[in-house]
Image (tube, rainbow, N blue to C red):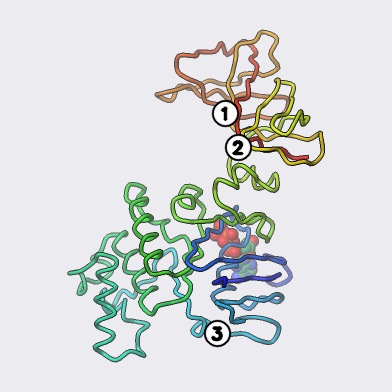
Amino acid sequence: MSSLVLEKVSYQYQQQAVISQLDLSVEHNEIVCLLGASGCGKTTTLKAIAGLIKPQQGRISIHGQCMSHKQLFVSPQHRNIGMMFQDYALFPHLNVAQNIAFGLSKLNKSERNRRVAQMMELVRLEGLEKRYPHELSGGQQQRVAIARALAYRPNLLLLDEPFSNIDTQVRFQLINDIRSIIKDQKVSAIFVSHSKDEAFAFADKLAIMHEGRIAQLDSAKNLFQKPKTKAVAEFLGRGIYLDATRYNGQSVTTKFGEVSSSISLPESEQHGQIYVRPQHIELVNAPQGQVEILQQRFIGTEYVYHIKVADQQLEVPAPAEQLLDTNQPVSLKIKAHAVNFFS
Ligand SMILES: Nc1ncnc2c1ncn2[C@@H]1O[C@H](COP(=O)(O)OP(=O)(O)OP(=O)(O)O)[C@@H](O)[C@H]1O
C-alpha cells in the first residue's frame, strides 16, 4: 500500500492557482524529493499534506486513510506526520531531551524517558540531553529536529529544506546519516529541496514540479535518460536542442553527424529534437564549423568554452591539452549517450 497518495489536488491562494490537479504517490519506506523552480508550489504541497492548508479540490490519503476530500478534513495533529522545517524550529527554552519529548505527552514518564534515550542513541547525540539549542552546532540541531520528528513514530515525515543551513562540508555526511535513520525506522518521507545534488544523495525518487503539477516522478537515472518533457530535461541541467531525425532505434542524424544512443529511442515521430548536455559534446577544430566560441576560461583541470550554436548558448568543458583558437569557428562531435529525443 502507498504511504501517501495525492489525487488531482488543487490549491489557490486568493484567486491564484498554485497547485493544480496534482497527482503524487509515495510508497512505503520511500524517500521522495519535491524539486522545482522557486515558487512552483513545493511548500504549498507539503502544507496540504500536513493539513496546514485545505486544498479546494482533490483527495489526500495517508496509509490508505483519507485525510482531505470534499467536506472531510483531518487536522494536522491527527495525521500522524512528523515535520521538520528549514530552521528546525527547536524550542529555545527547552533542552535537547525536552525538545525531543515535546510531542510525547501521551506516554507515561518512564516510557517517555525510554523513547528519548532511544532517539538520542539513534541520532548519536548521547550525552547532550541537557544542552540548549543555542549550545549546539547546526548539524546537531538538525539531528535533534529529526529525533523530535521521529520520536512519536510518525507514518510519514515531511522535511522542508532540512539541509539548507548546513555547511557544505558536513552536509553530505548528515544527508547520509539522516537517510540511514529514516530507512532504519521504516518511515516514508517527502523532502523539499532546491538542490539537485541533495536530492540525488537523499531521495529514492525525484518528483519534478512544474506549473503546479508533478511533471515526472522517477529515479534520478530515469529522469536524466528519459525525461518526459522538455521542461524536465531543462530543469536537470543546461543543454542545447538540435534538430534530429530518427535514423533507427539506436541513433539519430543531426547537422553535426550521427549520434548513437545507449538506450532505445521511443518509436514516435521520425523528426524532432535532441537535447544535448555539455558533457556529451566534444568541440573540434573546423574552419567551416557552424559554432562560434564566445569566451574561453581555464578552471584548473580543464577549459570551459562558452559557445553559440545558432541562437543557443552553452558552456562546454574541454581537456586542458586541447586548446582551441577562440577566433576560429569550431564544430561539435556528439558522443554516444542516452539520447533525449523529443518528437
Ligand atoms: N500565504 C500566501 N498567500 C498568497 N500567495 C502565497 C502564499 N504563500 C505562497 N504563495 C505563493 O504561492 C506560490 C507557491 O509558493 P510555495 O511557497 O509553495 O513555492 P515553493 O516552490 O516552495 O517556492 P520556494 O522554492 O521559493 O520556497 C508562490 O507564487 C507564492 O508567492
Q: Quadrant of ligand 1?
A: bottom right
In the image, what residue occupies the spot 24% across and 88% down? 110
- Distance between mark 3 and mark 1 Cα atoms: 49 Å
328 lies above or below 206: above
The answer to whether any part of residue 92 appears in the image is: yes
| Disc 3 element | loop
Dot 3, crowdedness within 10 Å: few (<14), some or many (≥20)?
Answer: some
Check disc 1 and report the residue beneath it: 315
In the image, what residue occupies the spot 21% across and 73% down? 129
Please state if 217 lies on the left or on the right of 134 as rendered: right
Residue flagged by tag 1: what amino acid is it? Glu
Image marks 2 and 1: residues in contact by CB distance under 8 Å? yes
Dot 1, crowdedness within 10 Å: few (<14), some or many (≥20)?
Answer: many
Mark earlier in primary sequence (3, 1): 3
Number of labels in the image equals 3
Mark earlier in primary sequence (3, 2): 3
